[in-house]
């Protein structure tokens, strides 16, 4: 494993340096049929789950086959995607904002061989490499974060629960039987790298134990004032502690004020809060980002805590499944999960999804809390 | 024989959904065999060790990654995120495991030549693991070591004409929906605006000078496929201000059942025959439509462009022709002060090159935010702290009724002195002449 230089000279870092060139220009990557018909599309239709046709004013058509994928993928897998695109799509493809892959062809006769090729490919462990689906009134890929694979603040894994949940929801990825699209997202901590706070169903990792103070190292590792000011609830204050005969600067925490957000830990590695029993999953539902019919909405917390049950998170996936089934059975056509819950009332939502209501689900965080309490005599028994 | 036993992860290989575990195992095997004779620049068994450390997390229910250190490439403050394993002796292959963000092309279209080149580079100088894509939009290359960073940057820029993305307190890599490249709903060319602004603000993207992160996202229509309204400090959502175009013949086609409603999106269940009254007219949030005598009428002045009727009857109804975008500001995820949705700042602006009007708004917002925000205060939090009016003033935008959902609930108006006749300096003795103490 000898070091191979790229040509970069560490003694003269500015020599031939190229910077600020940005991404490649998108037009380089347009398939010819896209380049030719951009801005001229008339309408589209979903021919079958996962297969779309877009029809242009020019009479041209582009057929898109959408496949799911783990957003965590290897170069071997990407090379296989490229090989498929070379074989069927003149070497072009795209990814969607929800980590799906789209293969596009310019005539209908190319669709069937493409689908057959995609569906025939499986990993050694037996799972599909390229399941076709994720369109229309169904469940598409779960957008998610890094989790235990690569992040320092997660309260749950990301790829693991996503794989487990998508296995359970797979039929709804492959079909379009729901009243509307149902967007599922996962964020492995409160930072929410991704828009889980506006998803039909959000899986959120949450800590439940306050940070531990690593007094011996805290002042050496951290800017104490920065860590203290990072606390949204002012639960932290500077303190002095006796350690092996020395007086050390450190941080004291008022545990009952802690909201377990981990923001202090982001600022100071000497305040870890991850914990096997403390960490787990919060389920939120009823959010959306589309302006269709009703305004965008935030998701609401409906399950305060489910333990991390690696490797397959069965309680989490069972709760999600129950929500999806109740929604599918009861909502009107076009109704998103949140619109359905608002129409039938949250009382009925909890009944139908067989969820328990506990004090944790009454908002007590700052101003917005008040607006979620019931300020009317209209309610359902 | 795998380097580490992974009995928990192995259970994620079954089931129909693509298994990331199988994929990483496949990569571990490819690296071990090395049939192409790659001179791997980081440990060959990096994927084995990643599976090992992940298995340990599955066992412990806790992550084994530490905070990033300061790593990066010369002259940039973002694009690389340092990452170290907290069990380096057990898993030396991933002891140093930094992330590189690559600025993705607008629309996330690729050709295979580019992808293969990227794969070759990442095989050679990294772990071979990626995210296609990260939540913000970048291609994320997961796992390399510090000595490789400059080498990767050199090869990216010199051989591929490709730059890094954003991280830290800077402009994060902007991202967009598919836009007019393949969507009939797009009210503007999201790719062109996204790319143009990305290029215009390269300095802001690479060199953190902001109070905190700042995100742009570009949605071509109010359907919001990139969720800009929920997760970007500035959200550009396509809209129009003239009339929805109606093809009455196609409307009849939907009513008569010849055309499939909603572009076929409900095809897996029998929802019965399409009922225009129930499914369109009655669901219109403003009640601005009616269907009588076989003709669909829209009172466009009352339409709020929610997209429902257009989504449901795409061959009959089309977006208007006087198009542009609305700009909303301040969206963010919950941390720290709770989640915020974007608030409407500019109801309508034409989206025309060179986009000067849009850039003016962006730069006014940045000037205000950089001047006033505290460390790690997102734009949305500043707007809440100082008030919407302060932002309007900073951007030199006149208040309009469209800015609010409803007028304020309290009369506690912070009057400016110059708005009150005679000002605030008064003579109390003059007052006392008429009002005894």
Image (tube, helix red, strand yellow):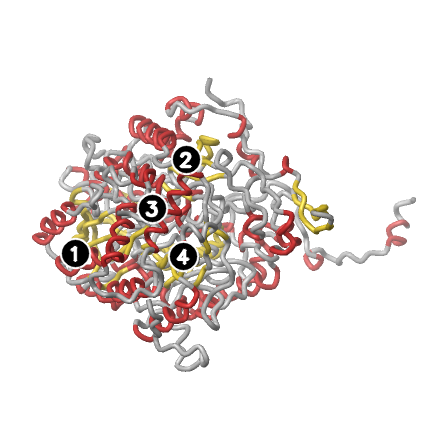
Task: Confirm whether circles 3 and 4 share one chain.
Answer: yes
Q: Residue at x 25, y 51 (%)?
A: B26
Residue B400 in percent (x, y) is at 52, 53
How many angstroms separate mark 1 from mark 2 (CA)?
37 Å
Chain letter belonging to callout 2: A
Q: Residues within 10 Å of mark 2 (few under 14, many from 20)?
A: many
The residue tagged 2 is A285
* Mark in front: 4 vs 1: 1
| Labels 4 & 2 near each other (Cβ < 8 A) | no
How many angstroms separate mark 2 from mark 3 (CA)?
38 Å
The residue tagged 1 is A84
Q: Residue at x 32, y 46 (%)?
A: B307
Give the secondary structure at mark 4.
Answer: strand
Task: Confirm whether circles 2 and 3 share one chain.
Answer: no
Residue B359 in percent (x, y) is at 46, 67
Give the secondary structure at mark 3.
Answer: loop
Q: Is residue A298 visible?
A: no
How many angstroms separate mark 4 from mark 2 (CA)?
24 Å
The residue tagged 3 is B4
Q: Is residue A355 visible?
A: yes
Residue B217 disc label: 4
Residue B318 in percent (x, y) is at 26, 51
Residue A162 in percent (x, y) is at 34, 41
Which of the two residues, A296 or A147, is positioned nearer the viewer here?
A147
Chain letter belonging to callout 1: A
């Amino acid at each position: 494993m000898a070091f191979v230089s790229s040509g970069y000279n560490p003694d003269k870092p500015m020599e031939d340096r190229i910077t600020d060139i940005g991404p490649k220009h998108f037009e380089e990557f347009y398939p010819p049929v896209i380049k030719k018909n951009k801005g001229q599309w008339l309408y589209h239709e979903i021919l079958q789950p996962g297969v779309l046709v877009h029809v242009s004013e020019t009479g041209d058509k582009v057929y898109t086959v959408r496949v799911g994928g783990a957003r965590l993928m290897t170069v071997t897998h990407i090379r296989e995607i490229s090989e498929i695109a070379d074989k069927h799509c003149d070497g072009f493809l795209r990814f969607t904002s929800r980590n799906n892959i789209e293969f596009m062809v310019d005539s209908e006769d190319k669709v069937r061989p493409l689908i057959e090729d995609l569906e025939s490919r499986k990993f050694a462990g037996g799972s599909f490499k390229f399941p076709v689906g994720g369109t229309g009134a169904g469940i598409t890929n779960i957008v998610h974060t890094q989790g235990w694979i690569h992040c320092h603040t997660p309260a749950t894994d990301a790829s693991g629960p996503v794989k487990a949940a998508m296995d359970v929801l797979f039929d709804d990825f492959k079909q379009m039987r729901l009243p509307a699209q149902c967007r599922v997202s996962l964020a492995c901590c409160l930072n929410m790298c991704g828009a889980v706070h506006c998803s039909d169903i959000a899986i959120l990792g949450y800590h439940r134990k306050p940070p531990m103070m690593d007094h011996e190292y805290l002042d050496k590792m951290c800017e104490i004032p920065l860590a203290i000011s990072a606390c949204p609830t002012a639960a932290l204050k500077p303190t002095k502690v006796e350690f092996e005969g020395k007086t050390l600067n450190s941080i004291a925490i008022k545990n009952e004020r802690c909201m377990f957000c981990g923001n202090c830990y982001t600022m100071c590695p000497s305040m870890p809060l991850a914990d096997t029993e403390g960490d787990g999953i919060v389920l939120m539902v009823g959010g959306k980002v589309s302006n269709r019919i009703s305004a965008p909405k935030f998701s609401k917390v409906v399950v305060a805590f489910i333990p991390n049950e690696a490797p397959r998170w069965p309680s989490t996936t069972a709760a999600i499944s129950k929500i999806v089934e109740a929604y599918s059975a009861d909502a009107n056509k076009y109704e998103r999960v949140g619109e359905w819950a608002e129409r039938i009332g949250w009382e009925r939502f909890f009944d139908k999804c067989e969820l328990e209501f506990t004090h944790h689900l009454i908002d007590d965080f700052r101003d917005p809390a008040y607006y979620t309490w019931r300020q009317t005599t209209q309610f359902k028994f | 024989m795998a380097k580490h036993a992974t009995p928990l992860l192995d259970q994620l290989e079954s089931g129909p959904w693509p298994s990331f575990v199988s994929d990483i195992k496949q990569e571990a095997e490819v690296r071990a065999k090395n049939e192409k004779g790659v001179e791997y620049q980081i440990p060959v068994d990096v994927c084995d060790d990643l599976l090992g450390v992940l298995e340990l997390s599955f066992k412990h229910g806790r992550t084994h990654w530490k905070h990033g250190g300061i790593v990066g490439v010369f002259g940039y403050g973002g694009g690389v995120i340092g990452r170290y394993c907290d069990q380096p002796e057990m898993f030396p292959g991933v002891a140093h495991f930094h992330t590189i963000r690559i600025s993705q092309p607008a629309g996330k279209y690729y050709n295979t030549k580019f992808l293969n080149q990227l794969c070759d580079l990442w095989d050679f100088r990294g772990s071979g693991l990626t995210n296609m894509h990260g939540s913000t939009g970048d291609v994320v290359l997961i796992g390399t070591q510090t000595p490789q960073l400059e080498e990767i940057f050199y090869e990216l820029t010199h051989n591929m004409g490709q730059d890094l993305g954003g991280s830290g307190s800077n402009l994060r890599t902007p991202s967009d929906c598919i836009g007019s490249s393949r969507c009939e709903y797009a009210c503007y060319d999201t790719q062109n605006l996204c790319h143009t602004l990305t290029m215009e603000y390269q300095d802001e993207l690479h060199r953190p000078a902001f109070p905190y992160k700042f995100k742009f996202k570009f949605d071509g229509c109010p359907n919001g496929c990139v969720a800009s309204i929920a997760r970007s400090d500035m959200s550009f959502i396509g809209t129009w201000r003239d009339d929805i175009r109606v093809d009455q013949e196609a409307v009849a086609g939907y009513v008569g059942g010849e055309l499939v409603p909603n572009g076929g999106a409900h095809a897996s269940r029998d929802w019965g025959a399409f009922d225009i009254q129930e499914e369109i007219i009655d669901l219109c949030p403003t009640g601005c439509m009616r269907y009588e005598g076989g003709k669909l009428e829209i009172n466009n002045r009352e339409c709020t462009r929610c997209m429902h009727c257009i989504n449901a009857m795409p061959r009959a109804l089309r977006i208007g022709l006087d198009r542009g975008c609305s700009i909303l500001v301040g969206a963010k995820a919950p941390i720290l002060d709770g989640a915020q949705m974007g608030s409407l700042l500019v109801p309508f602006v034409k989206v025309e090159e060179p986009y000067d009007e849009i850039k003016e708004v962006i730069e006014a917002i940045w000037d205000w935010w950089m001047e006033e925000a505290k460390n790690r205060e997102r734009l949305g939090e500043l707007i809440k702290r100082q008030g919407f009016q302060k932002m309007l003033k900073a951007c030199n935008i006149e208040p309009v009724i469209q800015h609010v959902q409803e007028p304020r609930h309290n009369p506690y108006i912070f009057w400016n002195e110059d708005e009150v006749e005679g000002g605030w300096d008064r003579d109390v003795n003059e007052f006392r002449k008429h009002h005894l103490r």
